[in-house]
Amino acid sequence: MKHSDSQLYEISNAQVVKDSGFDGGGAPPSGGLDLHEILFILFSHKWKILILTVIGLIAAAFVYFTQDPLYRSQAKLLVHYVLDPNNSDLRIRDPRQMQAALNDEEEIIKSWDLAIEVAESEGIDREKLLPDADGEVSVDAASFVISGGLDVQRKPNSSILWVSYQHPEPDVPVVVLKEIISQYLSNHLQI
């Protein structure tokens, strides 16, 4: 009876070893891909990879040659303080109220009213804003181009507003951004 128990034990150990795939002579198999498997995958899908690469290169060349480059002008506005609306002698000192006030300043810069004021100003040549337009450019069309090219960003816990304007004509962004800042400062003082 003892002899049959030891045979049973040896058989069960042999099955465990055989099932694990470890033959005891080397290292156990790894779970990752080896170089041969990677090369097999690449060569078996080589036409898909080649076709998609060519399509991507053609699309990139199409975009590169058909789109006009955009010229950008940037400015940083430091908002030293914002007056408390309830008391014009006091500056806002609470950081949460200051962030809310800076959000308001950002909205003033991005407002449609400011874009119209910039489009109506004497320093802006509306025909340069829309060079492909037939005839005289309306104030609304120029305002749309101005607000479409304007970007205002602010980092958290910062009182600096990053204002940028982009346009396909190289000399337009600087002129428009100067006028935006001038009109913003005028509106800021009025408000």
Image (cartoon, rainbow, N blue to C red):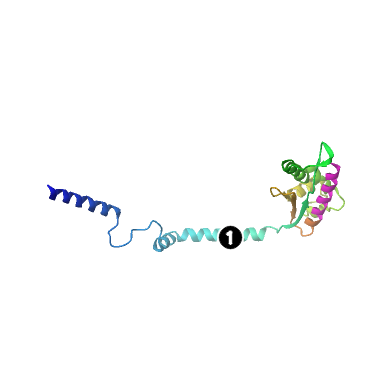
Would you say the magenta stretch is mainly helix, strand or loop? helix
Residue 132 visible, this angle = no
Count all numbered tags in the image, as a single digit: 1
Q: What residue lies at 53% left-to-right and 60% top-to-bottom?
A: 53
- Which amino acid type is shown beneath numbered disc 1? Ile
Q: Nearer the viewer, residue 63 or 88?
A: 88
Q: Is residue 16 left or right of residue 94?
A: left
Q: Residue furthest top?
A: 86
In the rendered image, the vertical position of residue 79 relative to residue 57, given as above or below:
above
Q: What residue lies at 78% left-to-right and 51% top-to-bottom?
A: 78
Residue 188 visible, this angle = yes
Q: Nearer the viewer, residue 152 or 50?
A: 152
Q: Which residues are magenta?
A: 175-191
Q: What residue lies at 30% left-to-right and 53% top-to-bottom?
A: 20
Question: Toward which corner of the image does residue 22 lie, by quadrant?
Answer: bottom left
Q: Is residue 18 left or right of residue 84?
A: left
In the rendered image, the vertical position of residue 27 relative to residue 94, given as above or below:
below
Q: Residue 168 appears at what percent x and percent y?
A: 74, 57
Q: Residue 19 appears at what percent x and percent y?
A: 28, 52
User: Does residue 95 belong to the magenta stretch?
Assistant: no
Q: Residue 113 appears at what percent x and percent y?
A: 80, 43
User: Does residue 177 belong to the magenta stretch?
Assistant: yes
| The C terminus, quarter of image | top right
Q: Residue furthest left?
A: 1
Q: Nearer the viewer, residue 158 or 67?
A: 158
SS under mark 1:
helix
Q: Residue 52 appears at what percent x and percent y?
A: 52, 58
Structural crowding at the residue carrying mark 1, measured as other residues with C-alpha within 10 Å and reported as few (<14), some (14–19) or many (≥20): few
Q: Which residue is mark 1?
A: 58
Q: Nearer the viewer, residue 60 or 8?
A: 8
